[in-house]
Each structure stands twice: as C-alpha cells, then as structure tokens.
Image: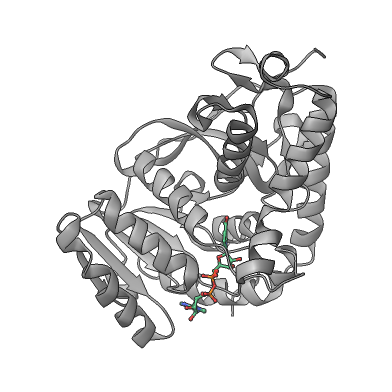
C-alpha cells in the first residue's frame, strides 16, 4: 500500500453560546421534498420534542406540519408547527433545505446562483436573531452554501456544518455491503471533498472490521479489485443523477443522513462524520468548505480529523477544492 500522510487534527475554538439552547428543538427552513422528509424522519427519531417548519410558502409548511404531526400518535410526543424566523433563536439545530433542487441533467453546481440569492435572504433573518444553535446546511451546492453561511451567518465557524458527504458515505457503505454481502455498518470507508462530481473515495483507509478492503474483497468476491473500485465510484457518484432521472428528486437518504448528524449534535455523541467544514491549510487547502471527517458534538464541529491519504487521494482532494474555489471566486457575497 502506498505511504499515507495525515495532517495534525485541529481543535475548534470553544466559544460561549449566546443563549440557552433548547436541546429538544429543531427548525427546518424549506419544506419541499427534503425538508418534509427530514421533518418526518426527525419526528420518528424521537430526538426532538419541538419541530418548527418554515417556508416562503407558509401554507405548504402548515400542511406538512399537520401531516407529520398526525404520525406522533404512533411515535412519541412532539409539537410540530409552521413557524416564522422568530421561532428559531433557541433551536438547537437550524437546518436549511430551502432552495432549488437539481432537474434531470443539472449538476449541483448549476444551482449556485439561485440558491446563493435565497441563502442571502435567509441568513439576514438568522443574523438578526443571534441564534444559539448549530446551523446545518443541506441545500445544494452544499459545500458552496456552507462557505456562504460561514461568511454571512454571523455564527462562529464551528457552529456551521454542511451535510457534505455524509449521505454519499452512506451510499458507499450500502453498495459495498450489498456487493460483498456484509452489514454496511461494518464497512468503514469514506467519501471526501465536494458533495458532487469531484468527490473522492478514501480507498487507502477503507476496511471491513479491521480487514483492509482489498483483502476483504479477495475473500468475498472474484475479479479485479481495481474494476470493483471503479464500478463502485461510478455508482456512488451518479446515484443522485439516477434517482433524479427516475423520480425527479432525492429525499429519503438525505433525511436519514440529516437525522444522523442531528443525533450526533443533540446527544453530544462526539461522532466522526464526513461533514462539510472550512479547511485551514490541511493538505495545503484553505478558505473552502468540503468534507473531511470531524468529531461532531453539542457545539458542532469539535475537532477536525483530516485522515491519512495516499498521494493520489491528496491530489484528488486538492482538485476537488480547486473546483469549489473556482465557484466561490465567482460569487458576490456582498450584503444589500
Ligand atoms: N445535501 C444533500 O445531500 C442533498 C440531497 C438532496 C437534495 N438536496 C438539496 O436540497 C434542496 C431542496 O431540495 P428539494 O428537493 O426539497 O426541493 P423542493 O423544491 O422540493 O423544496 C424547496 C423548498 O424551499 C422553499 N423555499 C424556497 N425559497 C425559500 C426561502 N427563501 N425561504 C424558505 N423556503 C424557501 C420552497 O418553497 C420549497 O418548499 C436542493 O438544493 C437540493 O439540491 C441536498
């Protein structure tokens, strides 16, 4: 195996929270496919006792709140309602799923101009309320919008998280588990970089219960490991395109990924998740948000854990960062 190198983990500064946080409250801004599926998954998770839904289409938020709240009789008590920005200040987590989604054939980056404009409006509401919780960005392009939130939300950087490649990593574990006939929870493999076309799989550190993935592959399958890797990379990278072509939107997988991140935050789990976070010179990359593993807990990003990568993976990560930086350079982040 090629030699790998790992930058030193960077602890995030510990900053005081501005208000008491209501650990049992979450706000979801944007109640389309992703926002409503997320509300539904969070209701079932039992993590929260108050879920606030906000949308420019207030009636839509009301309808989703009613529909989801009718499920609580079969889950656990939870107040679910359509609210306003005045309801978000004490929420433990504010999830932003508002924005245009991909149409068949569109990339996530194609959404950037529309969604940056939408985010500017939402962030001016957030800025004016000195919110206490963690901001969780889900709308696409998620890495660019995470960068926009770090710049414009007024929140400390460790309280701004992008869902990043948590979903892609889940897809990767699922497909490897399916192909090699093993529980995906025992597959330890990660997707890094952009949540999008330039993402990469950290193959050099992938393993199944401590057995390097290549060795496990040779135990469980026949054929070329290189071809297996290429096939898996293509499937994972194109998963969203395939779903959008077939059913116009993706929402169940991301709803579960968001629920996983929310659990790590409100239960202070210190879980290592591949979330979108701002780089500070790791691998020579800075001033851009992309996914690398971080310890996630109550205050958001607690420690960045840049993993060991071989030379090829480092080059791919830098290339992913370069692609995102090019988009960032074209943005107008001035506030009206
Ligand atoms: N990060 C991920 O892994 C992931 C996965 C799937 C989808 N997404 C992204 O999530 C976003 C939402 O996707 P969707 O399928 O739910 O789209 P959708 O069109 O169904 O829903 C978007 C919702 O946002 C609302 N909205 C628009 N502007 C708003 C504003 N200023 N304030 C409040 N609400 C506003 C709309 O009224 C609508 O209800 C898209 O950007 C999509 O690409 C991300």
Residue in the foreground of this view, choosing between 198 and 236: 236
Residue 92 in view = no
Residue 121 is situated, as x and y percent measured from the top left of the image, at: 52, 77
Residue at (71% x, 22% y) in the render: 221
Residue in the foreground of this view, choosing between 156 and 56: 56
The number of numbered discs placed on residues in the rendered structure image is: 0
* 218 left or right of 304 in image: right
Residue 86 found in image quarter: bottom left
Q: Residue furthest front?
A: 222
Residue 87 found in image quarter: bottom left
- Up the image or down, 90 lies above or below 81; here it is above
> Quadrant of the image for the N terminus?
top right
Residue 288 is situated, as x and y percent measured from the top left of the image, at: 69, 48
Q: How is the image coloured?
A: one colour
Residue at (72% x, 26% y) in the render: 203
* 66 left or right of 144 in image: left
Residue 320 in view = yes
> Quadrant of the image for the C terminus?
bottom right
- Up the image or down, 17 lies above or below 200; here it is below
Residue at (81% x, 52% y) in the render: 323
Residue 19 is situated, as x and y percent measured from the top left of the image, at: 26, 54
- Up the image or down, 195 lies above or below 219; here it is below
Residue 135 is situated, as x and y percent measured from the top left of the image, at: 44, 55
- Up the image or down, 255 lies above or below 125; here it is above
């Amino acid at each position: 195996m090629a030699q790998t190198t790992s930058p030193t983990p960077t602890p995030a500064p510990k900053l005081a929270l501005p208000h008491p946080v209501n650990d049992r409250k979450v706000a979801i801004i944007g109640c389309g496919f992703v926002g409503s599926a997320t509300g539904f998954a969070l209701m079932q998770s039992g993590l929260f006792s108050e879920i606030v839904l906000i949308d420019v289409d207030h009636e839509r938020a009301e309808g989703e709140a009613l529909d989801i709240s009718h499920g609580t009789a079969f889950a656990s008590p939870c107040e679910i309602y359509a609210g306003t920005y005045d309801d978000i200040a004490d929420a433990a987590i504010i999830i932003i799923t508002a924005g245009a989604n991909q149409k068949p054939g569109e990339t996530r980056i194609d959404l950037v101009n529309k969604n940056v404009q939408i985010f500017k409006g939402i962030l001016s509401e957030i800025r004016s309320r000195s919110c206490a919780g963690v901001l969780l960005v889900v709308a696409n392009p998620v890495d660019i919008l995470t960068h926009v939130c770090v710049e414009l939300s007024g929140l400390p950087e460790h309280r701004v998280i992008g869902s990043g490649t948590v979903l892609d990593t889940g897809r990767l574990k699922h497909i490897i588990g399916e192909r090699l006939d093993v529980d995906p929870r025992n597959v330890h493999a990660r997707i890094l970089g952009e949540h999008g076309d330039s993402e990469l799989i950290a193959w050099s550190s992938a393993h199944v219960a401590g057995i390097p993935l290549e060795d496990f592959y040779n135990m469980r399958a026949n054929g070329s490991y290189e071809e297996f890797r290429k096939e898996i990379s293509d499937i994972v990278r194109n998963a969203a395109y395939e779903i959008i072509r077939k059913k116009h939107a993706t929402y169940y997988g991301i709803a579960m990924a968001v629920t996983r991140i929310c659990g790590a935050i409100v239960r202070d789990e210190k879980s290592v998740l591949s979330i979108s976070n701002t780089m500070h010179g790791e691998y020579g990359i800075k001033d851009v948000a992309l996914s690398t593993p971080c310890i996630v807990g109550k205050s958001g990003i607690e420690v960045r854990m840049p993993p060991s990568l071989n030379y090829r993976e480092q080059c791919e990560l830098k290339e992913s960062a370069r692609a995102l930086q090019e988009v960032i350079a074209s943005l107008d982040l001035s506030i009206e």
